[in-house]
């Protein structure tokens, strides 16, 4: 048997150390916080599982979790088909390719808090371009600072505006990697556009789309900055997503114990959903 | 040095347990390479590491579910988790 070269482990060590310091050690501290009560001064008192019980049975947590799932569901169901459609419509060669790619990449270059501030100003009913147009020109009542539905529409559209590009670029990368021979074969067989999409383009895009959905799931499930800057979780609590609620508990109320318990539950849900999704998408690959 | 991390004995033991399990996996991997991959009852191809991961994540959810739906004490979910771990390493 050929002896495996184990030197690769050496090269991974710096990354492992980095992850240990920026993820693992803080995470262990969060676990420690989650079973204790503190009033500051680095003094801690044993509390056991009380915080976990409090979070798991609290209506506030259930509602924030429900809003979080709704938000992630909405943006995935819009961004993925829309992204694929745009990628299909983009030219694959010629003068317009760089133009399309740069235009698509632009929203992703803008920092999250700037996106939130932009959309806030854009949609304010009296001074924002969109808000003024809707309220005063079209006469449709639209105020994301007062109306929960308007707030939801705004945060969903904002996320679609910001992140559909990611799906587009990944799907486009999958599309351009398909050799021309496939299309020629389809043409000879007289395949319809739908058949070409279903049996050539979609299977070839599956890997990149898996990554795209996974990234969008994790990002949207952990989203904080954009809705925080746009609505601050309001009106009322209608757009208080999990991370916004978490920061309110941890920093607003300085309840580090319950916040730690909540973040561990939050983390477990993200981990389970990502694992389930990835496993289901790649399950059949291993067999063939 | 570790004062800021607010360690307690139970949480320390939890991590010692997890890292010990990972250490055992490394030793097993050195002794029997390949991760003992197999197709389990769930239709997944899993290695020893996957089975440990599924055991730990599943146990976390068993405890969360019990705490949220039934409340303490937690002896029952402990028993269920041990059963789940046994099932994972045996069949999954």
Image (cartoon, rainbow, N blue to C red):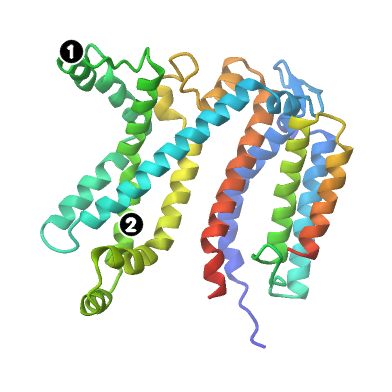
Whole-number angstrom distance, CA of label 2 to CA of label 1: 39 Å
The verdict on a common chain for dots 2 and 1 is yes
The answer to whether marks 2 and 1 mark residues whose Cβ atoms lie closer than 8 Å is no
- Marks 2 and 1: which is nearer the front? 1
Outermost residue, left direction?
Answer: A95
Q: Identify the residue at horizontal 24%, vertical 47% (top origin).
A: A104
Which x, y percent locates residue A65? 57, 30
Q: Quadrant of residue B36?
A: bottom right
Q: Identify the residue at horizontal 77%, vertical 39% (top origin).
A: B63
Which x, y percent locates residue B66? 78, 36
Q: Which mark is residue A171?
A: 2
Position of A203 compared to A100: left or right? Answer: right
**Quarter of the N terminus of chain A within the rendering:** bottom right
Q: Quadrant of residue A145?
A: top left
Q: Residues within 10 Å of mark 1 (few under 14, many from 20)?
A: some
Q: Residues within 10 Å of mark 2 (few under 14, many from 20)?
A: many
- Which chain is home to disc 1? A
Residue A255, above or below A16: above
- Which chain is home to disc 2? A
Return the disc, 2 or 1, that comes first in the chain's sequence: 1
Q: Identify the residue at horizontal 37%, vertical 32% (top origin).
A: A156
Position of A276 compared to A146: left or right? Answer: right
Which x, y percent locates residue A108? 31, 42
Position of A225 compared to B19: left or right? Answer: left
Position of B6 compared to A276: left or right? Answer: right
Q: Which mark is residue A136?
A: 1
Residue A141, above or below A170: above
Closer to the camera in the image, A165 or A144: A144
Which x, y percent locates residue B45? 64, 68
Q: Is residue B6 visible?
A: no
Closer to the camera in the image, A241 or A280: A280
């Amino acid at each position: 048997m050929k002896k495996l070269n184990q030197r690769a482990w050496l090269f991974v060590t710096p990354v492992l150390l980095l992850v240990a310091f920026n993820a693992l050690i803080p995470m262990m501290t969060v676990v420690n916080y989650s079973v204790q009560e503190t009033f500051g001064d680095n003094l801690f008192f044993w509390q056991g599982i009380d915080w976990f019980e409090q979070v798991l049975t609290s209506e506030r947590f259930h509602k924030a979790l429900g809003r979080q799932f709704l938000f992630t569901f909405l943006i995935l169901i819009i961004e993925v088909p829309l992204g694929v459609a745009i990628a299909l419509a983009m030219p694959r060669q010629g003068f317009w390719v760089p133009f399309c790619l740069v235009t698509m990449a632009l929203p992703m270059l803008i920092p999250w808090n700037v996106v939130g501030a932009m959309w806030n100003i854009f949609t304010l009913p009296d001074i924002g371009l969109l808000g003024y147009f809707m309220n005063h020109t079209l006469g449709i009542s639209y105020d994301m600072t007062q109306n929960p539905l308007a707030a939801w529409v705004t945060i969903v559209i904002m996320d679609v505006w910001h992140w559909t590009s990611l799906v587009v670029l990944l799907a486009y990368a999958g599309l351009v990697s398909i050799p021309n021979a496939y299309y020629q074969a389809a043409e000879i067989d007289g395949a319809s556009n739908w058949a070409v999409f279903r049996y050539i383009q979609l299977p070839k895009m599956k890997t990149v789309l898996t990554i795209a959905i996974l990234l969008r799931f994790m990002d949207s499930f952990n989203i904080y900055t954009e809705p925080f800057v746009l609505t601050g979780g309001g009106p009322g609590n209608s757009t208080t997503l999990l991370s916004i609620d978490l920061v309110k508990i941890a920093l607003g109320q300085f309840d580090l114990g319950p916040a730690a318990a909540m973040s561990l539950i939050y983390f477990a849900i993200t981990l389970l959903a990502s694992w389930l999704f990835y496993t289901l998408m790649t399950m059949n690959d291993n067999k063939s | 040095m570790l004062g800021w991390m607010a360690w307690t004995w139970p949480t320390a033991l939890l991590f010692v347990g997890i890292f010990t399990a990972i250490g055992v996996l490394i030793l097993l991997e050195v002794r029997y390479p390949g991760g003992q991959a197999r197709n389990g009852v769930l239709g997944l191809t899993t290695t020893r590491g996957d089975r440990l991961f599924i055991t730990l994540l599943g146990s976390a959810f068993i405890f969360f579910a019990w705490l949220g739906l039934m409340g303490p004490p937690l002896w029952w979910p402990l028993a269920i988790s041990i059963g789940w771990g046994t099932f994972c390493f045996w069949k999954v």
